[in-house]
Image (tube, helix red, strand yellow):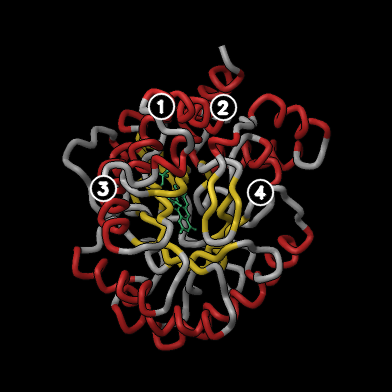
């Protein structure tokens, strides 16, 4: 029985955000201590077949932590020690934000899902940028950049640029979040003109590698528009997908009616379809995220065209051994299908 099997009922007795804070603080305490080395010995899977190259970076394995888990870039090192090949920190905004009133994060236990309406609470680009500049990790750290709450879409390009300029030193790649369902004014950003204005402003600031993160709820033509911009501006990748504002009828938990973005198992198929849709249309790496909780799920996204995968919600349900389980499972799946590396399986189903 793993330690998490014992800890989980205790954590699940707390409100979801409090439980997250407890776990986060425990990891923060471990960061940089000999415990981190011990964690790494237990959880890291060191196998060259898992190594992936994407947008000029080398990843020891394709499994990363999605944005939102380490919003303030406090624990990228220890998350790497847990076996993750990379961490996407943030979303970061130009100024500190407190986010929406609590409660704002809900477990849907029966559905292995979460609904959150955090509203981009974070310490702000200045503080996070300095923290990142002091952080030395062996794995790539991406920075998720979002629009400040009270900035309207006309001023969004300058707002994103300001944030980027403060976090540039410590980031290895940058993800432009234009798809947050929980903060004011994001819908207006998901039209072609606004997206192009933001992304060209960031290119002008020298941002790169530069990726864009899309919502799972966008209709096909809107995704096509986003992909036109990826091609036109020569962007480096696409993260698919963010949380969903839709509520599949199969949801059973009482919290299903909460407002916010749905993540976890119920969006898995949808996110994988989006990965495929994107990978069929553009020639840049796709980061597949949404409902990944097993090696099989990660492998489905890889075969659908994802070079890298990320997860958040499954960490809540499965605990800290998840990266190791997925990486070990991926090696078995690759072997069973005759692939000699993750890279050779990327897009096998296209
Ligand atoms: C509590 C919470 C906070 C999140 N915050 C962010 C964020 O700040 N920026 C962002 O781009 N995505 C954010 N996400 C979305 C995740 O990065 C991911 O796209 C989504 O949860 C789907 O993955 P999952 O099913 O593995 O959780 C957040 C998700 C959760 C559950």
Earlier along the polypeptide chain: callout 3 or callout 2? 2
Q: Considering the image in quadrants, where does the N terminus appear?
A: top right
* Gap between marks 3 and 2 measured at Cα: 30 Å
Asked whether the viewer can see residue 98, the reply is no
Graded by Cα atoms within 10 Å as few (under 14), some (14 to 19) or many (20 or more), the crowding at tag 1 reads: some
Q: Which mark is residue 194?
A: none
Q: Secondary structure at mark 4?
A: loop
Residue 350, how many percent across, how many down?
A: 26, 47
User: Which label was assigned to residue 321?
Assistant: 2
Residue labelled 1 has its Cβ within 8 Å of some atom of ligand 1: no
Q: Which residue is mark 3?
A: 350
Point out the tag, 4 or 3, that comes first from the N-terminus: 4
Give the mark nearest the N terminus, 1 or 4: 4
| Mark 3 C-beta to ligand 1 under 8 Å | no
Structural crowding at the residue carrying mark 3, measured as other residues with C-alpha within 10 Å and reported as few (<14), some (14–19) or many (≥20): few
Name the foreground residue: 311 vs 108: 311
Say which of 193 and 26 sits in front. Answer: 193
Question: Do the residues bearing badges 2 and 1 touch, measured as CB atoms within 8 Å?
Answer: no
């Amino acid at each position: 029985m793993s330690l998490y099997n014992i800890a989980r009922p205790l954590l699940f007795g707390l409100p979801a955000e409090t439980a997250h804070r407890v776990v986060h603080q425990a990891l923060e305490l471990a960061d940089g201590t000999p415990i981190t080395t011990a964690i790494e010995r237990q959880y890291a899977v060191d196998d060259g077949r898992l190594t992936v190259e994407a947008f000029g970076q080398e990843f020891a394995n394709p499994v990363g932590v999605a944005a939102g888990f380490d919003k303030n870039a406090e624990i990228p090192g220890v998350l790497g020690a847990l076996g993750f090949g990379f961490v996407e920190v943030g979303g970061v905004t130009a100024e500190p934000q407190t986010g929406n009133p609590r409660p704002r994060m809900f477990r849907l236990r029966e559905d292995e899902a979460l609904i959150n309406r955090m509203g981009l609470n974070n310490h702000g680009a200045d503080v996070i940028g300095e923290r990142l500049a002091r952080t030395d990790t062996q794995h790539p750290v991406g920075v998720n950049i979002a629009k400040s709450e009270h900035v309207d879409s006309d001023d969004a390009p300058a707002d994103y640029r300001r944030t980027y300029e403060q976090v540039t030193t410590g980031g290895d790649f940058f993800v432009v979040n234009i798809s947050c369902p929980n903060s004011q004014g994001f819908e207006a950003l998901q039209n072609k003109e606004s997206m192009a204005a933001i992304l060209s402003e960031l290119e002008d600031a020298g941002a790169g590698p530069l990726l864009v993160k899309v919502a799972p709820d966008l209709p096909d033509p809107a995704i096509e528009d986003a992909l036109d911009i990826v091609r036109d501006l020569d962007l480096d990748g696409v993260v698919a997908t963010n949380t969903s504002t839709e509520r599949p009828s199969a949801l059973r938990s009482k919290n299903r009616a909460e407002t916010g973005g749905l993540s976890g198992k119920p969006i898995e198929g949808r996110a994988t379809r989006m990965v495929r849709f994107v990978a069929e249309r553009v020639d840049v790496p796709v980061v597949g995220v949404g409902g990944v909780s097993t090696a099989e799920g990660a492998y489905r996204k890889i075969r659908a065209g994802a070079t890298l995968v990320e997860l958040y919600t499954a960490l809540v349900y499965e605990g800290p051994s998840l990266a190791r389980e997925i990486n070990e499972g991926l090696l078995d799946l690759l072997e069973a299908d005759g692939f000699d590396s993750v890279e050779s399986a990327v897009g096998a189903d296209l």
